[in-house]
């Protein structure tokens, strides 16, 4: 405080100003501290809310997984996996003989077909009385179902020649061996994009054979015009190969025709030749060995124990 302030009587005023400035500074620091705390509180609250949201999302996810696990466990407990077996050769005969020998009282054995649409006939539904078995049948379709009214036997058979007849009740299952085993004289032809093999058979014995391979370009990695030109050339080669296959099939010595191979090629030939049965098989190798594999695949039967 200066001498002039004391002489002029301004000393008390100056002291009051100093006190007010000190109080103002204290209040400013308090305000800044409070603002900092408030900002920290807002940040903390936002952080807590974000963490809570994450925990709630995770909880909902875990609850959903738990529900799915419970449903899956319940379904597994109620519906153990069906036993599926691919039957070949003698095994087909063994199973067919067992089914054929099954005998019950009048109207005790049901034979019924389920088409590719998976629609289960009412007779089958009423006999099974179980939703999970109906689902299995839909998965096995198209198939032939053999059931007995006591629930002792329940199987489904699937194969290229296995029919899907209307439900029939009898004291035995209505089965024919020709549905699952080769019989009589017929042609089995394998068609791939670069290969053709044809066999004339008497039952399971091949009595004649014809096969050839065609030059068909493989994959191409370049784009642009060269790619398009490559694809056109490949399509032309496949068309020429199919025409050669068609000519060989028209000259076959056995009228009954079973056509197997890749789906697209088989469908193209089937549109003109109307084969008695078609099937998709994955037979690779040289024509004669591929035909042997195709024969085994075609005459295999899938058995589903319900």
Image (spheres, rainbow, N blue to C red):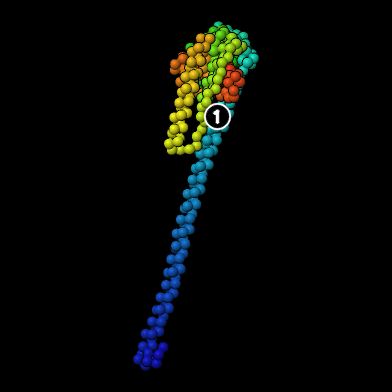
The residue located at (59%, 9%) in the rendering is 202
User: Can you say whether 171 is above or below 154 in the image?
Assistant: above
Residue most extreme to the left: 8
The residue located at (54%, 13%) in the rendering is 187
Q: Nearer the viewer, residue 293 or 250?
A: 250
Quarter that holds the C terminus: top right
Let me know if residue 217 appears in the view. Answer: yes
Q: Secondary structure at mark 1?
A: helix
Q: Pinpoint residue 115: horizontal percent, then vertical percent.
A: 48, 18
Q: Pinpoint residue 282: horizontal percent, then vertical percent.
A: 56, 24
Quarter that holds the N terminus: bottom left
Q: Nearer the viewer, residue 132 or 258?
A: 258
Q: Nearer the viewer, residue 17 or 177?
A: 177
Q: Pinpoint residue 250: horizontal percent, then vertical percent.
A: 48, 13
Residue 20 is left or right of residue 258, and the answer is left
Let me know if residue 156 appears in the view. Answer: no
In this figure, which residue is indicated by the disc labeled 1? 75
The residue located at (49%, 19%) in the rendering is 244
User: Can you say whether 212 is above or below 70 in the image?
Assistant: above
User: Can you say whether 263 is above or below 10 in the image?
Assistant: above
Q: Residues within 10 Å of mark 1 (few under 14, many from 20)?
A: few
| Count of numbered tags | 1
| The quadrant where residue 101 appears | top right
Q: Nearer the viewer, residue 190 or 112?
A: 190
Q: Pinpoint residue 201: horizontal percent, then vertical percent.
A: 58, 11
| The quadrant where residue 26 appears | bottom left
């Amino acid at each position: 405080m200066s001498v002039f302030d004391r002489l002029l009587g301004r000393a008390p005023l100056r002291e009051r100003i100093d006190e007010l400035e000190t109080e103002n500074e204290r209040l400013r620091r308090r305000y800044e501290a409070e603002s900092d705390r408030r900002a920290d509180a807002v940040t903390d609250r936002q952080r807590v809310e974000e963490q809570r949201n994450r925990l709630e999302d995770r909880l909902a996810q875990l609850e959903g997984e738990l529900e799915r696990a419970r449903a899956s466990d319940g379904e597994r407990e109620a519906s153990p996996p069906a036993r599926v077996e691919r039957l070949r050769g003698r095994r087909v005969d063994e199973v067919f003989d067992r089914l054929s020998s099954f005998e019950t009282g009048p109207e005790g054995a049901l034979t019924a077909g389920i088409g590719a649409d998976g629609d289960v006939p009412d007779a089958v539904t009423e006999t099974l009385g179980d939703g999970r078995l109906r689902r299995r049948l839909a998965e096995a379709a198209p198939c032939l179902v053999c059931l007995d009214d006591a629930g002792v036997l329940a199987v489904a058979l699937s194969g290229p020649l296995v029919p899907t007849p209307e439900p029939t009740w009898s004291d035995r299952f209505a089965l024919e061996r020709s549905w699952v085993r080769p019989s009589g004289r017929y042609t089995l032809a394998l068609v791939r994009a670069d290969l053709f093999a044809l066999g004339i058979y008497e039952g399971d014995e091949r009595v004649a054979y014809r096969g050839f391979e065609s030059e068909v370009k493989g994959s191409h990695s370049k784009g642009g015009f060269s790619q398009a030109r490559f694809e056109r050339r490949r399509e032309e080669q496949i068309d020429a190969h199919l025409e050669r296959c068609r000519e060989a099939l028209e000259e076959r010595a056995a009228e009954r025709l079973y056509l197997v191979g890749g789906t697209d090629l088989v469908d193209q030939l089937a549109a003109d030749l109307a084969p008695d049965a078609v099937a998709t098989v994955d037979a690779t190798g040289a024509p004669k060995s591929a035909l042997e594999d195709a024969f085994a695949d075609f005459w295999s039967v899938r058995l589903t124990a319900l």
